[in-house]
Image: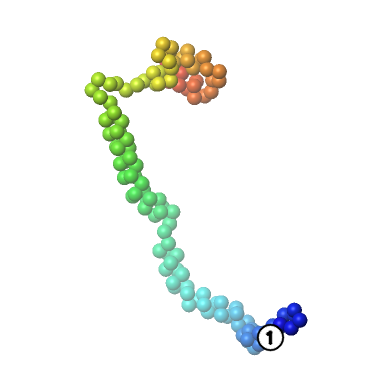
Amino acid sequence: MKDGQDERAPLGSLDPEVWDPGFWERFHRRVLARAAGELARRRSSAPRVNDLLLSWSRAVVPAALLAASLGGVLALRGLGPTQEAATLQELLAPEDADLAAALAASATLDAVNVFLADVEY
């Protein structure tokens, strides 16, 4: 570099397009023709969406079954011979009030509260 100017070597003579017009188009076609078999093989062996979901289900379904059975065992293990499962009313309402009155007394009646009141009664 001299005085901040950029000196570049002329590389245009190295481009095959200079002495052989259409070189890059022919080169591209030749490469794709030679690779066509391998590209077709890779396309056919690529996993499809159905294959992917099936491979996931092989691992996810047994894991979900294991988690559900473990949860069931833990839930049942917590219940003693004299204990009973709590009802929805016991969980949501005070001991001396019934569920419908507790839900009606709340300031906001949303869809969940209305649904719960309908389910219980």
Q: Which residue is located at x 60 percent, y 80 percent?
A: 24
Q: Which residue is located at x 46 percent, y 70 percent?
A: 39
Q: Which residue is located at x 63 percent, y 82 percent?
A: 22
Location of mark 1 (residue): 10
The answer to which of 78 and 88 lies nearer the viewer is 78
The answer to which of 110 and 95 lies nearer the viewer is 95
Tell me residue 114's x, y (percent): 50, 20
Tell me residue 102's x, y (percent): 47, 15
Task: Count the marks.
Answer: 1
Residue at the far top: name it.
96
| Colour scheme employed for the rendering of this structure | rainbow
Task: Give the structural element (helix, strand or loop) at label 1.
Answer: loop
- Say which amino acid is labelled 1: Pro
Residue 10 in which image quadrant: bottom right
Left or right, 61 with respect to 23, comes to left
Q: Is residue 118 positioned above or below 47 on the image?
A: above
Can you say which quadrant of the picture contains the N terminus?
Answer: bottom right
